[in-house]
Amino acid sequence: MKEQYFTKDNISMKSLDIKNNVLKYSRKNELSLKTENLALLVTDMQDFFLKPESHAFIPSANAIINNINLLIKTCEDFDVPIILTQHINNKENAGMMDVRWSDLITEDNPLSRISDKIICDVPIIFKKTQYDAFYKTGLENYLRKHNKTQIIICGVMTNLCCETTARSAFVQGFEILMPIDTTAAYNFDFHLGTIQNLSYGFCQPVLSNEIIKAISK
């Protein structure tokens, strides 16, 4: 089931191909950002998913790190808040996660830490227990309090936590951007399926360099 569909060498071209192929599903083609209303959400970039020795390792995940760090640096330069999520479970809060998966990402697991490859000076960190980063985390309250209505979502996994969070955010009235080249899943089909579905009903397909240019205007 796992495959490395993104590498450092092919991610730019492969992501552009995905974007061109899913544009037909999109309702909107113009990218318009307001930095005062923008937040960057980096989802679950933990060693649990990034270290090859972990059974949950995502082969394409390391290829997206540079693009995520470029987004973080741009957002820091323009005072856009950077929010990181860290998925942590125990038997009491896991719910169906405990039923669906063979193990949980527990706090005492050294692989649960956010990867030190993610370079961020002053991150805002929310711990979460479900795919949805809004579920019982305080994320929505933070965004409302600071008048953040546009959210850039990146991280892992494209088809689980990223997609669920994007759908949840849309339902709650936030505008979503999920750069194709800043998320990763276990395989290409999972990744492409999410981008197709989100492009059709939730957000326009976009690349990280397009967002960086829009922020830097």
Image (cartoon, rainbow, N blue to C red):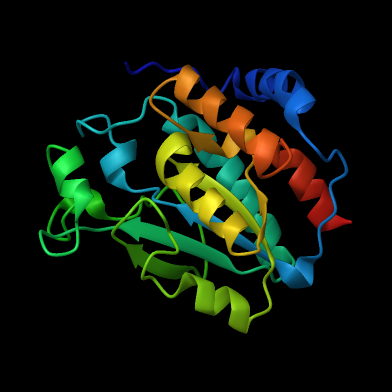
Q: With 38 as the anchor, is 197 left or right in this view?
A: left
Q: With 44 as the anchor, is 9 left or right in this view?
A: right
Q: Would you say residue 122 is visible in this rendering?
A: yes
Location of residue 44 in the rendering, given as x and y in whole percent from the top left corner: 39, 50
Residue at the (54%, 49%) spot, across then down: 167
Location of residue 34 in the rendering, given as x and y in whole percent from the top left corner: 81, 64
Residue at the (75%, 47%) spot, across then down: 211
Instruction: Examine the rendered structure and indicate whether residue 23 appears above or below residue 170.
Output: above
Location of residue 9 in the rendering, given as x and y in whole percent from the top left corner: 59, 19
- In the rendered image, which quarter contains the N terminus? top left
Location of residue 49 in the rendering, given as x and y in whole percent from the top left corner: 31, 39
Residue at the (66%, 44%) spot, across then down: 202
Q: Nearer the viewer, residue 128 or 118?
A: 128
- In the rendered image, which quarter contains the C terminus? bottom right
Tally of marks = 0
The image quadrant that residue 127 belongs to is: bottom left
Q: Would you say residue 104 is visible in this rendering?
A: no
Q: Nearer the viewer, residue 16 or 74?
A: 16
Instruction: Examine the rendered structure and indicate whether residue 122 appears above or below residue 168.
Output: below
Q: With 92 as the anchor, is 141 left or right in this view?
A: right
Q: Nearer the viewer, residue 66 or 204?
A: 204
